[in-house]
Image (cartoon, rainbow, N blue to C red):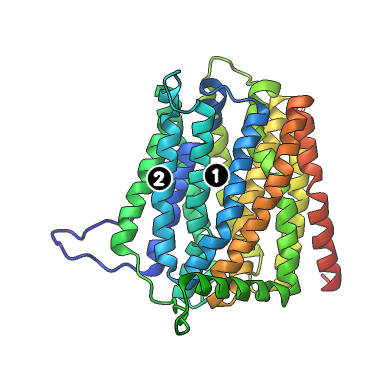
Amino acid sequence: MIPLLPKGGAILPKYSAPQIYLFMVFMMSLASSTIFTTYSIYYVTELGLSPFQLVLVGTVLEITVLLFEGITGVVADTYSRKLSVIIGVFILGSAFVLEGSIVWMMHPATLLPAFAWLLVSQMLYGIGWTFVSGADTAWIVDELKEDGAGRIFMRSKIFALGASLLGVVCSVGLSLFSSNIPFLAGGAVYFLLGLVLLRHMRETGFIRREREPHSSPVREMGRTWVSGISVLRHQPLLLLLTVVTLFSGAASEGYDRLWQIHLIDEIGFPDAAVPMAVWFGLISAAATLLGMLAVRFAGTLIDLHLERKISAALFLLTCVRMGGILLLAVAPDFTMAIFAVLLLGMVGSVSDPVYTTWLNTKLPSRNRATVLSMISQADALGQIAGGPVVGYIGSRFSIRASLLAAGFMLLPVITLFGKVMRKRGV
């Protein structure tokens, strides 16, 4: 972790861009793991959400992302990636502090019911995330001039997984006192990160777009947006990946929102004497450790400079992901269900840096954050379209049925990757 001040001195040290990026990844992963390791306990036992409400929470989040992602991506490309990241970090902190405070608002005198406050916090979460999403990776790729981008993304994933392990411990320990405290602690970590970035984050690689005479800020943002669309139109592989992201988002919403309640309500835990927070902590810790091993192995196996290798890796990882979701849906017992969850955790750990490296190195600097935001919008649109369907199936039939539906939503993704591989002779 980066110290704020040097020993015995008041002059601020100058940290390199990779150091700042790794610190940012570490802190955001720590906050996220602290919040989300035991979040379902807060949602289900304290706030009393149904499967449909759980997915609706995610749908509101993704609608917010869909609406704001393009705007914030253009801000990052037009004005400043650093500014976009810092604004987003402070908004994220506010969102999670509000979310953790909802349990104290559950009485008739409150202006809004608890579920409404939860939706407000999710909208804040979505806005904050869109300011950070795309801007953070665009910033570090610009600072490195695209040299070593693959290495820094693989290394950052190891940092993220290490922070997640620490976050698991924090989440379980805090949740044993009260299930809302992890949200408050995670929000505080975001605020701390924002303060550090204000003092130490520098932006030297970004070249701000020159404004035309008498051009308004809105018109400048419009020019950036149109140029981003042009990049997608003239690169068929990027356009294809946008479609892949659409279907992948539809599948992920069902799994991400329902796997924990599936374990609570339909699978059950083998030892009822062990608190649920401890069980989820053990599962998250195991998934994180296995993910770290998988990322290290993938880093030596996959050449991130060869496009056909990346295409083959993403195809294989998607097949395994679909199989893992379907296995969880039909798992007859706790052992099989946990095997599926851990397998999916490893797949996600490897897929993220591979996908991020390939995507960022294929994009021009001047449009990078905008195009990344457009692809993120495709993910949000997929989750908006698929989430309510999966949630309705869970409330109408069973959570197992929801997970089966989520798994089969990956079939179009596998088909598209297969076509790409055949065209390129992989």
Residue drawn at 63 percent across, 47 percent down: 346
| Disc on the earlier residue, 1 or 2 | 2
Question: x, y percentage for residue 419?
Answer: 85, 65
- Residue at which label 1 appears: 289
Question: x, y percentage for residue 31?
Answer: 43, 44
Task: Give the left or right position of residue 148, taking residue 414 as reference.
Answer: left
Residue drawn at 35 percent across, 65 percent down: 201
Location of residue 204 (image quadrant): bottom left
Question: x, y percentage for residue 63?
Answer: 62, 47
Residue that sits furthest to the front in the current view = 214
Task: Give the left or right position of residue 147, taking residue 323 as reference.
Answer: left
Location of residue 312 (image quadrant): bottom right
Task: Give the left or right position of residue 317, taking residue 194 as reference.
Answer: right
Q: Amino acid at mark 2?
A: Gly
Placement of 292 over or under 233, stated as above or below: above
For the N terminus, the image quarter is bottom left
Residues at circles 1 and 2 in contact by the CB criterion of under 8 Å: no
Dot 2, how many residues are within 10 Å of its Cα: few (below 14), some (14-19), or many (20+)? many
Q: What label does residue 93 carry, if any?
A: 2
Residue drawn at 86 percent across, 68 percent down: 422
